[in-house]
Image (cartoon, rainbow, N blue to C red):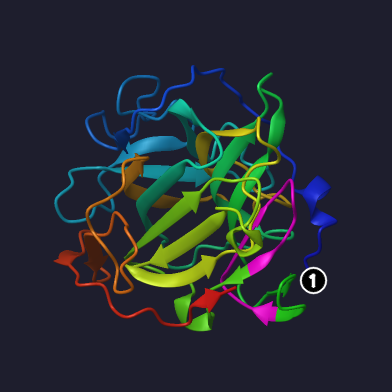
Amino acid sequence: MKTTVNLIAALAVPVLSLALPQAASAWTTNVSCQGGTTGTQVAQGGAGQWTNAFAQTVYSTSVVPSGASQSCQMGVTAGTDGWDQWGGIYSFPTHLGPGANLWIRLALYVPVGFNYTANPMLKFMRVHTASPSAANNGYNDLYIIPSGGTIWDHTLSKDVATPFAYYYESQGNVRGVGSTANKIAYGQWETYEIHYTMDTKPKNQGGLGEVKIWKNNVLLADLTDQFLLKDSTTYAESFFLFTYWNGMAPASQHVYVNSVTVTTDTPANKDAAGNPFIGGAVYSGSSGGGTTTTVTPDPPTGVTVQ
């Protein structure tokens, strides 16, 4: 499989845009997966809740990390694109323009046997950008690559075998993220975190644009070649988790999500290289509850720095 900039049109999805007022103060939201009746749709629209929790995003006690009583079970139906079923959206309380920083962290449990085949890639963690008129200006996307697949890395100018890929749909500089050693581990909790420095120009071209991606507190990529905003009027306005399955879901199935944090406030924790990140606990073990482990971040391995 070879991914090129021509994928931009193929990966376009329905957009839900909300016009929000500009504000400069930092904020932190812990998006809740707790407190509702098991099997019912996760609460939405209130403080600390998903702005839109899709229909198959329900409270579950089946697979829960240590320290939590419930998880968000996120499901999809075979043969559908998952829209309105699969995942959720959190709309930011402020618009994030050039120079803004954003960190997103979550815990994910992928059951044994889950089939994440997609055409060409499965949408995972995404930040939507918009114009002042709330028109779609593209997504900053982290994708999951189908098992055993490869993508064309535009900076390296070659196919790479990688479990994840990143790019901004408005700009199309596709990058591989991580090595085969970092692929999704079935049947256990794993933690993912992304730090976005929003800008119209990449850091390696004299701007601020940069994306750092961690898995289980290990830095997988520091991408300094990314345009994160289309132009100076564009802003980031919401976080999409899953929401759309490229090429239709191959099976009716679900994953579990917990510990979702979205913040513009620079975290106090630092990784092994001194980068601010939310960090903190990761989860180990294959049981439903797992074990909460406070981790001293390991030195980065397999890091791509451009």
Report if residue 184 is visible in the image.
no
Viewer-proximal residue, 234 or 201?
Answer: 201
- Camera-side residue of 61 and 223: 223
Between 19 and 245, the one nearer to me in the picture: 19
Residue 170 screen position, x and y as percent: 74, 46
How many discs appear? 1
Viewport quadrant of the N terminus? bottom right
Q: Residues within 10 Å of mark 1 (few under 14, many from 20)?
A: few
**What is the x, y in percent for residue 173?**
72, 61
Amino acid marked by disc 1: Lys
* Residue 34 can be seen in this image: yes
Task: Locate residue 235 relative to residue 25 in the image: left or right.
Answer: right
Q: Which residue is mark 1?
A: 2
Residue at horizontal 47 percent and vertical 62 percent from the top:
212
Q: Residue at x 40, y 27 (%)?
A: 24
- Please give the name of the residue rendered at 27% of the width and 70% of the height, measured from the top-left corner: 286
Q: Is residue 207 above or below residue 37?
A: below
In the rendered structure, does residue 170 fall within the stretch colored magenta? yes
Q: What quarter of the picture does the C terminus occupy?
A: bottom right
Depicted 23 relative to depicted 1: above or below: above
Q: Residue furthest front?
A: 206
Choose top left, top right, bottom left or bottom right for residue 33.
Answer: top left
When the figure is inspected, residue 68 is found, relative to residue 225, above or below; the finding is: above
Q: Is residue 67 left or right of residue 279?
A: left
For mark 1, give the secondary structure.
loop
Report the residue that reaches farthest toward the right. 6
Task: Give the x, y percent position of residue 155.
Answer: 71, 72
Answer whether residue 134 is magenta in the image.
Answer: no
Figure quadrant of residue 234: top right
Q: Which residues are magenta?
A: 160-175
Residue 128 at x, y = what percent? 59, 38
